[in-house]
Image: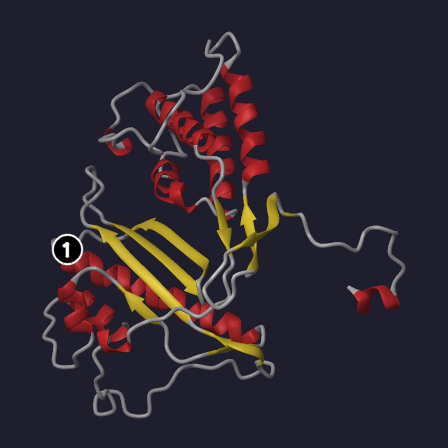
Amino acid sequence: MDMIQSKFTLKDGTVEEPKMYLGADIIKTRIPESDDPEKVRWSMASTTYTNKAISDVERVLGTEEYGFSFLTKNVTTPVVAGYRPEIDPTPELDQRKQNYYQGLICVLRWICELGRLDILMPVSLFSRCLAQARESHLNQVFHIFAYLKHYDKSKIVFDDSCPEIDGSRFHVCDWVEFYPGAQEALPPDMPEPRGKQVQLTCFVNADHAGCKETRRSHTGVLIFVNRAPILWFSKRQTTVETSTFGSEIIALRISVELVEGLRYKLRMLGVSIDGPCDVFCDNNSVVLNTTRPESPLKKKHCSVAYHKD
């Protein structure tokens, strides 16, 4: 900012620490550690944007059409336990409520972008109903806003410290015989790396046959740069897998593609990356099959995903 101010005239009092960016509250958070008791890092919260959205929803609920004066209190889960939107039998919404439903989903998706990862999965589920929602779909979206009202102190802290990961948990294998000359694709025009190196960590999981209508699985991915969550993904898979192994290995292939894209982007920003990305999943069969070159895989799409992983 000092450099910009030396070349351009800025209004007095406009050069200060950021407080808001694209609807997100930007604040400093103290996270004391043993080696740094006064450690302070930047954090991002959606409190202001979420509270404004909740006020708008409650104003609509207070109209004669709905007849509610407030959202349900003490809601502890984003969705009512056991509810499945894909098999909802309630009547379809009329055109006006349908447009309102679509607007609420847009608001919720932006709240997810501002760091509310706890509602990412439910918002993804109800986003499938954008073409034609039903009455209970709208009521469940109101339930999500009630949940946000009950838990309104969530934020993401961008901790730049490196995670401590036990390398012995990863099986080391020599892949040169199978992939001679293979190497990571680097941007040909990437700038010279600056600053400290960063570590990437990825957590991936799949809800096997979670959709009761199509029996398609749902993929969830969370990628950290050092200890800061940077990239999150929640989406239904395009294929129907007959086993947990199949859905997990497809989810792992999706996570690898996301990691590759993030590594490319970081390098184009001049960020130096320390070693490979550590990927964690909770299916032991997938871990064993993707870390050993002698794994026999009969299904073609699983075999393709295996070589991608």
Quadrant of residue 94 within the rendered picture = top left
Q: Position of residue 145 (x, y in %)?
A: 45, 29
Quadrant of residue 288 within the rendered picture = bottom left
Q: Amino acid at mark 1?
A: Thr
Q: Report the side of 242 relative to 281 (left or right).
A: left
Residue at horizontal 54%, vertical 54%? Answer: 30
Residue at horizontal 45%, vertical 33%? Answer: 148
Residue at numbered disc 1:
244
180 up-or-down from 3: above or below: below
Residue at horizontal 39%, vertical 25%? Answer: 138
Q: Nearer the viewer, residue 185 or 22?
A: 22
Residue at horizontal 47%, vertical 42%? Answer: 154
For the image, the number of numbered tags is 1
Q: Nearer the viewer, residue 211 or 171?
A: 171
Q: Quadrant of the C terminus?
A: bottom left
23 up-or-down from 233: above or below: above
